[in-house]
Image (spheres, grey):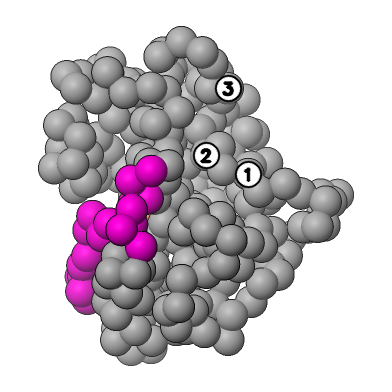
Amino acid sequence: MLNSTLGADNGDIPCKSQCPLDTNLYIGTIGQSVELPFLGGYIFEDAWLQIVNKMKLLKQTDVIGYLTEFCGNDALPKCDFSVINGINHIAFYLGDYDTNEQVLQWYSFLQNKAKCGEEITSVLMGPSYISPKQYGTQGWWYSLVFKDDFVIELFCCHRFGQWRDKSSKERVDLMSHLAFEVTQMEAVKPLIEGLERIENHLQVIAYTEQDEMGHTYGHVRNNQSNRVIELVHQLPIEDGGQGETV
Ligand SMILES: [Fe+2]
């Protein structure tokens, strides 16, 4: 069933009807300049607070509203969206890095967070598959699991080559995404292919079937807005899946 309302861990945050669709998934402020500082130029703890606050807001996203806006028309394309069951994870863009040292220092900060266990229980890091293939620059991902099992991903790309020529907003939109949970593994491919077939400006840029963690997922890019969504089925742990997504 499709949940149009999501709202765990609300705290003092206003209800979804009061929240505009937040499509800025950068940690920091996107300015007029093309500069997109890694972690918004914040010290790590301040960047961390930004991430947690944005995550809490975005967890309340109205799924139907978000997907409709993403697809670019007044109504959803005629695909079977009944297989979508809320948000699986949120992927933020951390900005462009200049040295691997910056990337590793942030990883160390996250590892310490995981060790202390107060907010997150695990963190992984690895090279981005999409950024070299699609945008000609090296990138990295981090995957974090919170105590309530919610997952976020964080991406960054090397300030290099043709990547630097894109506007700051475009770079954020291309590397960040909301990922929606698909209830059946076999429904992922037909849904992403259906979106691509029905809407000319939607393009499947990645599809993986049953990775080593038991995930089947696809990334769809809107070539007019440059925004990306992911549709993912996560095999239950009892069926061999692992609780983390990349
Ligand atoms: Fe993702």
Q: Which percent across, then down, holds residue 88? A: 49, 66
Circle 3: is it few (<14), some (14-19), or many (20+) Cα within 10 Å?
A: few
Disc 3 marks which residue? Answer: 29
Disc 1 marks which residue? Answer: 22
Q: Quadrant of the N terminus?
A: bottom right
Q: Quadrant of the C terminus?
A: bottom left
Kindly indicate whether the residue at mark 3 contacts the one at mark 2 (C-beta within 8 angstroms).
no
Residue closer to the observer: 69 or 208: 69
Q: Is mark 3 within 8 Å of ligand 1?
A: no
Kindly indicate whether the residue at mark 2 contacts the one at mark 1 (C-beta within 8 angstroms).
yes
Residue placed at 41% from the left, 56% from the top? 229
Above/below status of 169 relative to 152: above
**Mark number displayed over residue 25:** 2
Q: Which percent across, then down, holds residue 241? A: 33, 78
Ranked by sequence position, the earlier of labels 1 and 3 is 1
Residue closer to the observer: 50 or 35: 35
Circle 2: is it few (<14), some (14-19), or many (20+) Cα within 10 Å?
A: many
Above/below status of 187 relative to 203: below
Number of marks in the image? 3
Residue closer to the observer: 77 or 139: 77
Residue at mark 1 to residue at mark 2: CA–CA distance: 8 Å
